[in-house]
Image (spheres, rainbow, N blue to C red):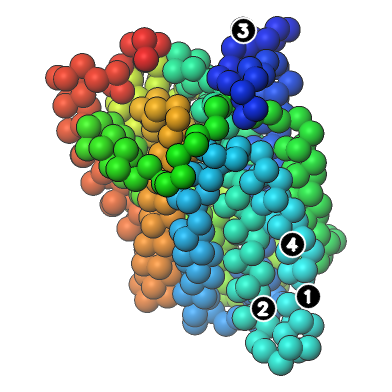
Amino acid sequence: MSDPAHIGGPVPASPGRGGASPELRAYHHNALYLVVAIVMIFLTLVLALQPLHLRHVLGLARDNAGFVNANIQVITELVDLLFVGYLGYVSDRIGRIPLMVYGFLLAGVTAFVAPFDREIGAFLGVSALVIFYLVRVLMSLGGTLVWPQVATLAGDYTRAEDRPRFLANVGFMMAFGVTLVYAILMQLPERIGLTLTMWLAGGIALVGAWLARSFLVEAAAPRDERKFPLREVIELVKKEPGLRLSFLSAFTSRNDMVIIGLFLMTWFVYFADLIPGLSQSQAASRGGIVVGILGVVVLLSIPLWGRLALRLGRVSAVALGLFLSGFGFASMGLILDPFSWWILAPVLIIGIGQAGCILVPQTLAMDLAPEGIRGSVLGVFNTVGCFGVIFFLQVGGVLFDWIGPTAPFVFTGVVNLLLFGYALFVANVVEKIGSPAGGREMSSI
């Protein structure tokens, strides 16, 4: 996965944390790609197991399944929201890697505890559901320590001219992690049980801590500023229409894979009650195959979006991704039976569009963020994304219970299509003012 131009020799880098100039080599890039896959495997597996655990272990009824599943995710996002922006600033000061190591350790330890929520609840005299809420919050907080720093480190390791290609590789590994979970690992609960599968997630997180500690290096100079550079970020957002579009895309699109992973798996698990002889584990396995197919589509589409970001320009590529994603999500409203293979039609469109929504908005934000405050800008980017996840999950959970299982997807699609209209407006503005966010001249930044 390493860039060919970087193989076999040092890559220029910004001054490191100690003032030295570290040489970035191919194995640093490949280690980062592997860490990306590991964190995505952990986060996706935990999310995919949640509906099955609530239904099979805690006995959660169908009547409020959408609300509870969404509510757990919303609470984790609220906790993340308290930290993600500040952690971006902290990473500018102390480095990305220490936060990643501690995050992986926290996530791994709590994953080992998660299967014992009933026993812990009985011992403490509280509901097992309360314990599960707490454990999920801690696992998510561990992920919040890791994932934003991975993305920021990807920006540190690149220049504007090679960033789309590098981030396309990062996006490929993200999609690989998601695909591996739904296509393969979600077949494990039926065979080895939920406990061992959750322990596997914990072990994966601990491997991630070891890899980050042993094979990654810092590549950006530390920032001495003691306060969060809020004024600088605000002025940058006011100045750059492309950055505003990137933040709005984070709001509407960061939730897309969460929506698919949570509500589609919940739909499959609870629809199984209507089919005689079909267990929840078998339904989850079938749902994992569908989401795994979506992951394969994202996997294959990511390299194409890297090229489109260079040829069309970042803003135009964002617009195209929003349109395809929005159209695919809205088309889910035509599906009545999740076990029908017709569901693959909108899923394929979502996968192609989602690949662009994963890659291009973050590339655009990195391009427009000054190096000294890149972590802080991406911290705000991720904070906006947290707001989006909370909003769409909360609304989606209510729509799932009150209207039907396809309602969260249709709502997401409509919002993405509205933002597509705004992206067209921004593309026109960028073209008129000649902003580097819009075209092929990114290499001049």
Q: Are there few (<14), some (14-19), or many (20+) residues within 10 Å of tag 2?
A: many
| Vertical order, 249 against 188 (above or below) | above
Tag 1 residue: 116
Amino acid type of disc 1?
A: Phe
Q: How many marks?
A: 4
Q: Are there few (<14), some (14-19), or many (20+) residues within 10 Å of tag 3?
A: few
Q: Are there few (<14), some (14-19), or many (20+) residues within 10 Å of tag 1?
A: some
- Name which residue lies at 76% across and 30% down: 215
- Name which residue lies at 73% across and 69% down: 114
Tag 3 residue: 5
- Name which residue lies at 71% across and 92% down: 125
Amino acid type of disc 4?
A: Ala
Label 4 sits on a secondary structure element that is helix
Amino acid type of disc 3?
A: Ala
| Vertical order, 73 against 258 (above or below) | below
Amino acid type of disc 2?
A: Ile
First reached walking from the N terminus: tag 4 or tag 3: 3
**Disc number placed over residue 131 in the picture, else none:** 2
The answer to whether any part of residue 161 appears in the image is: yes
Quarter of the image that includes the C terminus: top left
- Name which residue lies at 42% across and 51% down: 383
